[in-house]
Image: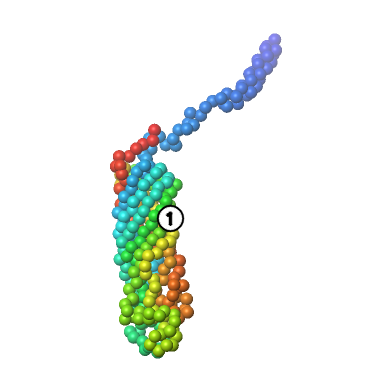
Amino acid sequence: MRMLNMRKLTVRIALAGIALAVAAPSALADRKNPLDGQPAVRHRKLLVSKRFEATPLFESTINADYKHTIGGGLKLEFHMSDMLSIGVIGVFGKSFNTGLSDKIIATLPQTSAPDDPDPTPTKDEFSQHLNDMPLHGAAYVSITPWYGKLAAFGKAFVPFDFYFQGGISFASLKGNCTQQVCNDTMVGVLDPANGLPDNDPNDDPSLNDGFKAGLYLGGGIHVFVSDFIAIDLTVRDYLFQDNPSGLDFNADLFVKKNDLRFLNHLFMGVGISILLPTKVKRTN
C-alpha cells in the first residue's frame, strides 16, 4: 500500500511539473518588463543638452613646415541634445618661423646675380615668400557619442564627454613679399626688361595669400569641473589650398596657382567652456 501511495505521489508531482512548464512561457510573455521605457541612468545630470556653450580658447599648429601659428579666439556652440550640436569657431593668430625655416635661412646666400642659373633663393626671397595666417576658423556639426566619469584614486569622480566635429573651414592668409623681392609682374611669361623668358621663380609673387575655404575636422574632450564649467581639449584640422613656401613647388620655373595644394593645417587647442544656463537639469 505504501508503495502504491508513493507512486501516486510521484505521478502527481510529475503532472504538476509538466503543467508549470507549459504555463510558464505564457506567464512570462504576459509579464511586462518594469524597465521598459525608463532612462538608462536615473537623475543623470544633462550637462550639455539644451545648453549654449561659449569657450575662450588658445590653439597652436602642430604640423607646420615653415611658419608656426599660435592664437586665441572663441568657440560658440548650441547643444540641441546630449549627442548633437552646431557651432562656429574663430581664431586670430600670430605666425613665426619654425626651427626648420631658421635652419634653411642660415644656409641660403645673402644675394644672387641676375643671370645666376642656380635656382636657390636668397635669404630675403625665401623669408618673404612664406605666408602668415592671421585669421582662421570653422562652422561645424558636432556629435558626442560617449560620456561618463573619470575617477582619480577611486575617490575623485569628474564627468567628461568625447566629441567629433565636421564642417567647413575658412582662413585668411597674408603674403609678405615686398615689391623689391617679388618684382616680376608678368608671372610665367616674358621678362619685360629683356624680352626673354623669365625662368627665375624666386622673383615671382607668392600667390599664397587671400581668403581660403575648405573642410574642417576635429575631435576633443570636455572635462567638467562644475555643472557649468569644463576644460575643453581639442585637436582641429583645417583643410584648404595653400602653398606655405610661396615658391615654385612643382618645379616648372614659375609660381602659379597650380603650386597650391590641398593641405592639412593641424592645431591643438585648450579652452574653458562656460555652459548656459548655469543651472543643470536632471533626468527623471
Place of residue 161 in the rendered image (x, y in percent of width and height, measured from the top left): 39, 47
Place of residue 162 in the rendered image (x, y in percent of width and height, measured from the top left): 41, 49
Label 1 Cα crowd, 10 Å radius (few <14 / some 14-19 / many 20+)? some
In which quarter of the view is residue 270 placed? bottom left
In the image, is residue 52 above or below residue 14?
below
Q: Is residue 145 visible?
A: yes
Q: Residue at x 61, y 22 (%)?
A: 23
Q: Is residue 150 visible?
A: no
Place of residue 42 in the rendered image (x, y in percent of width and height, measured from the top left): 40, 34
Kindly state the secondary structure of the residue where label 1 is placed: strand
Q: Residue at x 47, y 32 (%)?
A: 37
Residue 231 located left or right of residue 19: left
Give the quarter of the figure containing the C terminus.
Answer: top left
In which quarter of the view is residue 255 placed? bottom left
Q: Which of the two residues, 187 or 131, is positioned nearer the viewer here? A: 187
Most extreme residue toward the top is 1
Can you identify the residue that label 1 sits on?
167
Q: Which of the two residues, 129 or 18, is positioned nearer the viewer here? A: 129
Q: Which of the two residues, 262 or 107, is positioned nearer the viewer here? A: 262
Q: Residue at x 40, y 80 (%)?
A: 186
Question: What amino acid type should be assigned to the residue bearing mark 1?
Answer: Gly
Place of residue 33 in the rendered image (x, y in percent of width and height, measured from the top left): 51, 29
